[in-house]
Image (cartoon, rainbow, N blue to C red):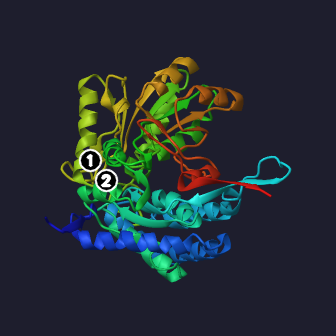
Amino acid sequence: MNTKFQVISPVDGSVYAERSLASAKEIDKVLAVAEKAQRGWKTSSIDERAAICRKAVQYFLEQAGEMAEELSWQMGRPIRYTPFEISKGFQERAHYMIDIAEGALADIHPQAQAGFRRFIRREPLGAILVLAPWNYPYLTSVNVVIPAIMAGNAVILKHAQQTPLCAERYAAAFEYAGLPEGVFQYLHLSHPQVAAVVADSRIAHVAFTGSVEGGKAIQQAVSHRFLAAGLELGGKDPAYVRADANLDYTIENLVDGAFFNSGQSCCGIERIYVHEQLFDPFVEGFVALAKQYVLGNPLQQETTLGPMVRTAASRFAQEQVREAVQKGATPLIEPQLFPAHREGTPYMAPQVLIGVDHSMQIMTEESFAPVVGIMPVKDDAEAIRLMNDSRYGLTASVWSANLDEAIRIGEHAETGTCYLNRCDYLDPALAWTGVKDSGRGCTLSSLGYEALTRPKSFHLKF
């Protein structure tokens, strides 16, 4: 077996890094060390855990510039945006989950009963395997890594092979913070090795973020054990623009929601339904703003749209566009407007299509690319029907001046999160979850601690 793998940078096709897959002996050692370390770590206090986790977060903030450049080389996001993954989203989620840990993990006391002391205590599970993707390698992983450690678990992190340096940065941060050895570790693994680790009895929980097919593989791997797996999978997230929406504000935010990170966002906007009264001005404004992106080398400050993660991803999205055009869709952006756009490379110009319908993959299957289809609708009922006409259900956004109507629409939307006048954002105070093929389980909020602990009842007569 080839034990080496390379990180091919989408920036220029060069080999940015090379790493070795863990050997069977190394994997066994990591699992053994995690099991032993967790026994001691679960006896630590919440305050001790919080102090160490806060210091680890501080390391990330101090190293954000250097880590951002690494990340741009690994996955292609423009350097003008990459630092904010750490200094904004990562920090916000980490600190929130640290701050609420004491309350989320507190004992639960039922109504007093004479002669008894009764309570429910949340205990850590053991060793948590976190499988993180490349598109937001710090943001997705922090959702589990920090609360898992705050709950008294040990963590083994496996990052996507496109972003292995991110796992190494976590290790450096926790070493800097003084986390006891073995409480956090990482492994570079192949897919078969991941399945073997999942099957190991020393793993108590698996948290996976990735594709639907990857989620099915994890589900298969855990099926032989009484083991829970949190699965955050694909999305085809819709937006609905009502007739009373603030047009300029809505266009600005939906263009960003569709094209930020080259469209490679779990909850990015992939399809838009616009009330027929606003359809023409919305499309005109949307296209005009999309044309203002600067596609190019992500290491240059003027670049606002970087390459996709790899050529195969760009090719897949362009095939979706071609299929839609063959079925009658109209593309509204000439790729030639973007000199860096080149077929056969990861550099793909943004694209907007009208004349689309749900017979086309561009409106039904995940694109994960800077491309979006826009359809007119006559009313809320049609918008709800089309939003729900999907095997995915991660987020849906409504753009309207009417709060009550947005809530009503949200109640009918088959999705994990409903937004009004915003999109593509995770509030750490709210549960992050999906329905249908977008996965199962929950991270963030106080509910996020439930998957990382087990309840233990104390029924004491005296």
Quarter of the image with the C terminus in it? bottom right
376 is higher (above) or lower (below) than 223: above
Q: Earlier in the sequence, mark 2 or mark 1?
A: 2
The residue under label 1 is 314
Q: Position of residue 351 (x, y in %)?
A: 35, 40
Do the residues bearing badges 2 and 1 touch, measured as CB atoms within 8 Å?
A: yes
Quarter of the image with the N terminus in it? bottom left
Cα gap from disc 2 to disc 1, whole angstroms: 6 Å
For residue 420, which quarter of the picture? top right
Q: Is residue 318 left or right of residue 446?
A: left
405 is higher (above) or lower (below) than 198: above
Q: What residue appears at the point 57 percent right and 21 percent down from the top-left corner?
A: 380
Q: Is residue 151 left or right of residue 229?
A: right
The residue under label 2 is 308
Q: Is residue 403 left or right of residue 214?
A: right
Q: What residue appears at the point 48 percent right and 59 percent down from the top-left corner?
A: 139
Query: 370 or 330, which lies in front?
Result: 370
127 is higher (above) or lower (below) than 385: below
Secondary structure beneath dot 2 equals loop
**Would residue 170 be visible to someone looking at this image?**
no
Q: Position of residue 341 (x, y in %)?
A: 26, 51
At label 2, counting other C-alpha atoms closer than 10 Å, the crowd grade (few under 14, some 14-19, many 20 or more) is: many
**Would residue 185 be visible to someone looking at this image?**
yes
At label 1, counting other C-alpha atoms closer than 10 Å, the crowd grade (few under 14, some 14-19, many 20 or more) is: many
Q: Amino acid at mark 1?
A: Ser
- Residue furthest to the right: 114
Q: Position of residue 97 (x, y in %)?
A: 62, 60
Secondary structure beneath dot 1 equals helix
Q: Amino acid at mark 2?
A: Met
> Mark on residue 284?
none
